[in-house]
Structures are given as C-alpha cells and as structure tokens.
Image (cartoon, grey):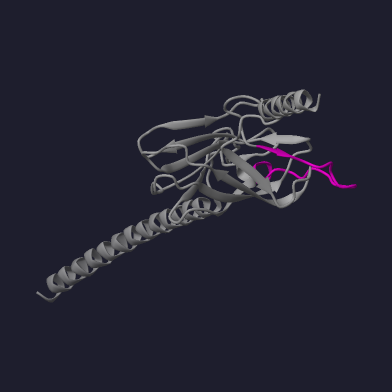
Amino acid sequence: MSRITLPRLSVAVATATAAVALTAVPAAAHTEVEADKAQALAENVTVTFHAEAESDSSGIKEVRVVLPEGIAPADVTYDKGPAGWKFTADKDGYTVGGKELRTGASAEYSVVVRQLPDAKEVAFKTLQTYGDGHVDRWIELDENGENPAPTLTLKAAAPGAKPIASASATESPAPTDADPTPAAGPTLATASAQATDTAEDSDSGLSAATWTGIGAGILVAAAAVVLAVRRRGGTEQ
C-alpha cells in the first residue's frame, strides 16, 4: 500500500507547488519603487526607482514618470541617477534621461518628494525609452496586469501629521494683462519739468519785453542828442 501512496503524494505535492507558483506570484513590475519613509503625509521623502532593462539590443536612455494625484511636479526634486542624466519637470510629472546606458544595464535613480499624499498607496506610471526608440509602458494600475505601474504602499499617517501647501501654490504669480496698472497721467518728475518749462517761458517773455523797452529808450535818447547837436550848430552860425 505504501508503494501506491508515495507516488500519489508526490504528484499531489508537485501539483500544489505548481499551482502556488502560478497564482501567488503576479506579473513582475520591471520598474520598481521604494522610499526611505513610506508613510502617508511624510515629508522630504527620498523615493528610489529601479528600471530594469528589457532589451537585448539597446540601452535605456530615458525614464518618464506621471506623478500620482497629490504630488505636484513642483514638489519633486532630483537626488541622483546615472552619470550625465538630467531631471526635467513638466505639467504632470518629470523625465530623467541622458546618454544611453549600455545594453542590459538597469537605470536606477532617486528623487525627493516634498510630501507624500494621504493615501494607502501611490502609483507612478512609467514610460521607459531605449536608444532604438522602443518604449516599455509600465502604466497599469492593476498589480496583476501585464504592465503594472510601480506602486508604493504607504503606512497610515503619523498622529498630528497635516498636509502642507504645495510649492506650486506658494510661488509668486507672474504678472498678467489683468494686473492693475497706474492710471495714465503726469508723474512728479513730469510735473516738475513742466513747471520748470513754464517758468522759463515766463522768464523769457519778461526779458523780451524789458529789452524792447530798453531799445526804445535808447533810440529816443539818441534822437534827442542828434536834434540838440543840430540846433546848437545852427545857433553858432
């Protein structure tokens, strides 16, 4: 009887093992994420991403991330990554990229998030681009999907933790056409200049009248002298 039981037991164990292997392990997220403080409302959190290379013919040159709700691009700063790679924020996330990595090399980089949202988990949809133009799209929110987005599970917020204002909300707004502008009119300097010009004009008019009177007086005096000389000459004759 033992000869019959042992083979059957071995088959049962093998079948159970295979079933566990097929059902308990979801599709691997080839871009993974972790944080030094994986807790809701935690501040200044370093979040590290590991983008595994999936191509046998080309290297990774860029990783584009769409940020989850509750994290604004202005609240994310670059920490470190592959040599020569740069960080660029955009309207809904950011891009980290640069010189193409060698084929088969994974891209690992980290960013600092000003504050994590008050949530149980946050997913970072990721587009992973290779030098030949191929793109791996890790964007599915279902962790059992074929292309799941890297997701960070968060602990409950610490007692007393509160949301802080986003950096984008505290930035000074740029001037717009709707901003009020000073009413058109003379400034103090303009008014002063106008007053000076008026005074100069007044001085110039008075001076001209004075010189006219002086000239007329000189002409009258000269005529009187000439007349007196003529009369004196006529008397002496």
Magenta stretch encompasses residue 150: no
Q: Is residue 172 visible?
A: no
Say if 78 sits above or below 57 in the image.
below
Locate residue 171, reporting x and y percent: 64, 46
Predominant SS along the magenta part: loop
Q: Is residue 123 visible?
A: yes
Horizontal arrangement in the rendering, residue 86 relative to residue 31 (left or right):
left
Locate residue 157, reporting x and y percent: 84, 43
Image quadrant holding the C terminus, namely: bottom left
Say if 32 sits above or below 3 in the image.
below
For the view shown, which residue lies furthest in the right direction? 159
Image quadrant holding the N terminus, namely: top right
Q: Which region of the structure is painted magenta?
A: 151-172
Say if 127 sits above or below 105 in the image.
above
Residue closer to the observer: 23 or 120 = 23
Residue closer to the observer: 214 or 138 = 138
Horizontal arrangement in the rendering, residue 163 relative to residue 63 (left or right):
right
Say if 124 sits above or below 115 in the image.
above
Q: Quadrant of residue 68?
A: top right
Residue closer to the observer: 149 or 219 = 149
For the view shown, which residue lies furthest in the left direction? 237
Locate residue 210, reporting x and y percent: 38, 60
Horizontal arrangement in the rendering, residue 64 relative to residue 225 (left or right):
right
- Residue drawn at x 47%, y 54% as measured from the top left: 193
Locate residue 116, reporting x and y percent: 73, 43
Horizontal arrangement in the rendering, residue 64 relative to residue 130 (left or right):
right
Q: Quadrant of residue 74?
A: top right
